[in-house]
Every structure is written in C-alpha cells, then in structure tokens.
Image: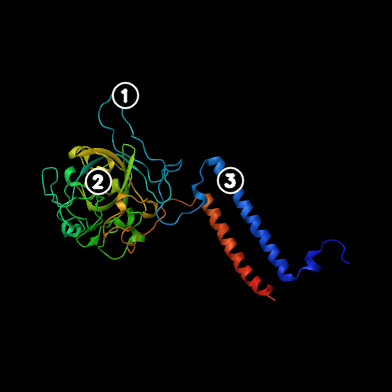
C-alpha cells in the first residue's frame, strides 16, 4: 500500500505527469497575464488592447485616440481664423495613425473640373492618372441636386472611390521619385514597388469637421503646389498663402458627408492605415478601393511603438504555441 499521494513517481506514467505539468503551466500563464491586463486596464482605463480584431477596426475615440477639437491659438477677442497647427511626429498617437494637422483650410475640387481663377489646373487628369475623368466614369458633378443620398454622383456609378482628396505634394517627378521621397515618407520602404510609381496615390486620410469624421483616399496633388513635404509629412505649417491658405482639397462626397457648406472650411486631418478604417460610404465603390478590390496592397505599417500590453500578449501566445506543440506529441504518447 502506498502512503500519501506520490503521483510524481508511483501512480502516473511519465508522459501523463508531463501533460499535467504543461496544463498547470498554461493555466498559470493565462492567470498571470490576465492579472497584468486587469491591472493595466484599471490604471489606464483602456481595454481595447486585450484583443486584436480581424479586418478594419472601427476607430472609436478613446483615451488613447481622441478626435481633435477645434484648436484656438489666438488671443482673447481676436476674430481671425485659428492658425494651422501641426502635431509633432513624436506626439501622442494610436497604432496605425499619424500626427494630426489641425485648422487646415480645405477647398472643394472634383474630377472633371475645368480650370478657373481658383483652380489654375483643370482636373480632367490628375498628377498620377492622365485619364482620371475617364477612369472615374465621368464628371463628378458637385451640385447638391446632382448628388445621391449615399454621396455619389447621380448620373453614374463611379468606377473609382468618390471619397478622394488632394495634398500639396507629389513624390514623383519626370518618371522618378524625388530625392527626398525615401527619407520623408514614413511608409516609403513598405510601399515601394518600382522607380517612378507613386507610393502616395491611394493612401487613406481621416478628415474631421465639426465633430464629424470622414475617410478618403489621396488621388491628386495640390492645391497650388506639389512640393510641400515639410507640411504633409513633417511638422511645418503649409507654405501656400493663396485662397485662404488652402492646404487640402476634398471631393464633393467628403464635403457632403462632413456637412460643409460653401467652398472652404477649417478641418483637421491625418494619415490612417487601412486596417484602422471602419466601413462607411467610402467603402462602397471604386476599383482603387481596397474595400471593393481586396487584391490591392494596403502595406500595413505600424507607425507607433508596441505597447506593453501588446508585447505581453504576443509573449503569451508564443509560449502557448510552443507548449501546445509538446501537447500534440503527448497525445501520441498517451494513445495506448
């Protein structure tokens, strides 16, 4: 008769003892990590990092990712518009996003627009597409009566995303990338495919106006200049002074979704990685739209350092994966 419960050497076979040890270790890892996560969440009030969702993530404002409010950087009583403000590149931001550009004058432009005093260059073609109007499907009529409730032109179904914008920088000149492009564009190395092919075309931006948020793709360059990389990618204010200092062009769809009345407005905008973009009217149309055409490369790029919670989660997954491989071999040993 055995005195006591000496499972470690008398009752259980060696393989079974190993299985118990692995199960106990997995349980301890799970409990320990859960305690760490609970403690972190209690201190920071953030629980979103406990799981990683598949597909586009809805960018809900949290303590870590708050939509900007109207920024006022003028003296009391001054009625002049607030000046542009660029958040530094090392400023606070959530994963998959880039620093905000605040109080930026936006003007409305559209595919097929003729040249005028406010638009020196016609928009029958873009900086990256010589057949922009034809590829879009026609004239993107900006008249409110010629728009549908889902923000597209009434006359036709657009073949490209009707949510588009222009920024005053072009990374390509005369068939080659500009010398500074590889140094100043954060995603250049990830997105580069061949010399002279833009890494900026199709990138997503988030635009905020009057507490309303919209997403659109970068499809043209301007207004007024195509060399203002210190503003687009750096921490300098826009160099343009024409037309109230316009520094971003928005399409009629973006205008209508944000509820902008008139030809200009002060907005906030930033670059956003595709995996952070929720579905909306900007996800419905366009061969250039990754929501519609999943074959388009989105070049996911994490612009923010890994958080402590994310690092611990990945460590836990790696340990569990390694131990589960041992459990598979244990099952084979235990099948007698």
**156 vs 324, nearest the viewer:** 156
Circle 2 sits on which residue?
Answer: 149
Image quadrant where residue 67 sits: top left
Residue 250: tell me if it is visible: no
Secondary structure at numbered mark 1:
loop
Q: How many marks overall?
A: 3
- Callout 1 environment at 10 Å: few (<14), some (14 to 19), or many (20+)? few
Residue 134 versus residue 94 in the image, above or below = below
Which callout, 1 or 2, points at the residue further toward the start of the chain? Answer: 1
Q: Which residue, as the protein is rendered here, is positioned at the far top?
A: 77
Q: Is residue 294 above or below residue 78?
A: below
The numbered disc on residue 76 is: 1
Q: Quadrant of the N terminus?
A: bottom right
Q: Between residue 116 and residue 45, name the one nearer to us.
A: 45
Q: Earlier in the sequence, mark 3 or mark 1?
A: 3
- The image shows residue 4 at horizontal and vertical percentages of 85, 61
In the image, residue 18 lies at what x, y percent? 70, 67
Q: Nearer the viewer, mark 2 or mark 3?
A: 2
Secondary structure, mark 2, is: loop
**Image mark for residue 38:** 3
């Amino acid at each position: 008769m055995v005195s006591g419960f000496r499972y470690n050497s008398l009752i259980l076979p060696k393989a079974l003892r190993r299985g118990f040890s692995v199960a106990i270790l997995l349980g301890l890892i799970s409990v320990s990590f859960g305690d760490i996560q609970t403690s972190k969440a209690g201190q920071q009030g953030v629980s979103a990092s406990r799981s990683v969702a598949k597909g586009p993530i809805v960018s809900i404002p949290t303590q870590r990712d708050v939509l900007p409010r109207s920024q006022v950087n003028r003296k009391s009583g001054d009625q002049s518009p607030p000046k542009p403000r660029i958040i530094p590149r090392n400023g606070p931001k959530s994963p998959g996003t880039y620093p905000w550009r605040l109080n930026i004058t936006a003007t409305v432009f559209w595919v097929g627009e003729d040249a005028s005093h406010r638009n020196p260059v016609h928009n029958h073609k873009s900086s990256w597409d010589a057949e922009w109007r034809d590829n879009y499907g026609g004239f993107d009529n900006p008249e409110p009566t010629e728009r549908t409730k889902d923000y597209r032109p009434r006359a036709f179904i657009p073949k490209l995303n009707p949510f588009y914008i222009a920024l005053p920088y072009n990374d390509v000149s005369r068939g080659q990338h500009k010398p500074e492009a590889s140094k100043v564009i954060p995603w250049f190395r990830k997105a580069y495919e061949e010399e002279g092919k833009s890494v900026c075309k199709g990138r997503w931006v988030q635009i905020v106006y009057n507490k309303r948020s919209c997403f659109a793709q970068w499809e043209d360059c301007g207004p007024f200049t195509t060399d203002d990389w210190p503003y687009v990618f750096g921490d300098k204010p826009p160099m343009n002074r024409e037309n109230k200092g316009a520094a971003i062009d928005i399409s009629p769809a973006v205008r209508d979704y944000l509820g902008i009345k008139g030809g200009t407005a002060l907005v906030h905008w930033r670059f956003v990685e595709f995996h952070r973009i929720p579905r909306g009217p900007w996800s419905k149309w366009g061969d250039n739209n990754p929501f519609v055409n999943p074959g388009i490369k989105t070049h996911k790029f994490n612009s923010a350092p890994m958080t402590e919670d994310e690092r611990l989660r990945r460590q836990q997954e790696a340990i569990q994966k390694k131990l589960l491989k041992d459990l598979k071999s244990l099952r084979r040993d235990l099948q007698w």
